[in-house]
Amino acid sequence: MRFLKPVRQCPHCHQDWTPQQADDFPAYVSILITGHLMAPVIIALVRDTQLPLGALVAIVLPLAIILMIALLQPAKGAIIAVQWWFGMHGFTRERQEAVDNDP
Ligand SMILES: [Zn+2]
């Protein structure tokens, strides 16, 4: 799936991105964030409006789906960035000197 496929190599600095192992963690992250963003919206809609159930579903469901899809790419990017930062899964930890200089 092109939408979620990370580039194999950065065209600028030639960083190799193939060691990344984000797996399905980005989906969990985007669902978690979507839930936290949607909860106050759903509570406000139910508490402050007299919308029928069908109207609530028609508002909440597309909004949740759009949010989840919109958050997938940044979530995957962030997870790959964390793996790179900490030198996980074959990424080379590039800030070793900062750790060594720690008192
Ligand atoms: Zn780069």
Image (cartoon, rainbow, N blue to C red):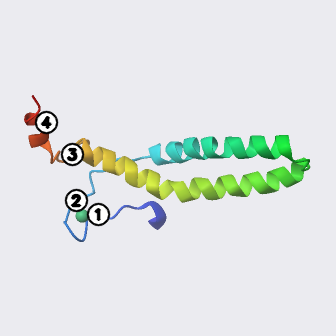
Q: Earlier in the sequence, mark 2 or mark 1?
A: 1
Name the kind of residue labelled 1 in the image: Arg
Residue 22 appears left or right of 56: left
Secondary structure found at label 2: loop
Please state the horizontal and vertical placement of residue 3, each as a whole percent of the image. 48, 65
Q: Residue 16 shows which numbered tag?
A: 2
Name the kind of residue labelled 2 in the image: Asp
Name the kind of residue labelled 4 in the image: Val
Q: What residue is shown with label 4?
A: 99
Q: What residue is shown with label 1?
A: 8
Residue 24 makes an appearance in the image: no
Q: What residue is shown with label 3?
A: 90
The residue positioned 86% from the left and 54% from the top of the image is 55
| Residue density around tag 1, few if under 14, some if 14–19, many if 20 or more, within 10 Å | few
Q: CA distance from mark 4 to mark 1?
A: 28 Å
The residue positioned 30% from the left and 45% from the top of the image is 83
Q: CA distance from mark 2 to mark 3?
A: 10 Å
In the rendered view, tell whether residue 11 sits above or below residue 32.
below
Q: CA distance from mark 2 to mark 1?
A: 6 Å
Disc 4 to disc 1: CB gap under 8 Å: no
Ligand 1 position by quadrant:
bottom left
Residue 94 appears left or right of 85: left
Q: Earlier in the sequence, mark 2 or mark 3?
A: 2
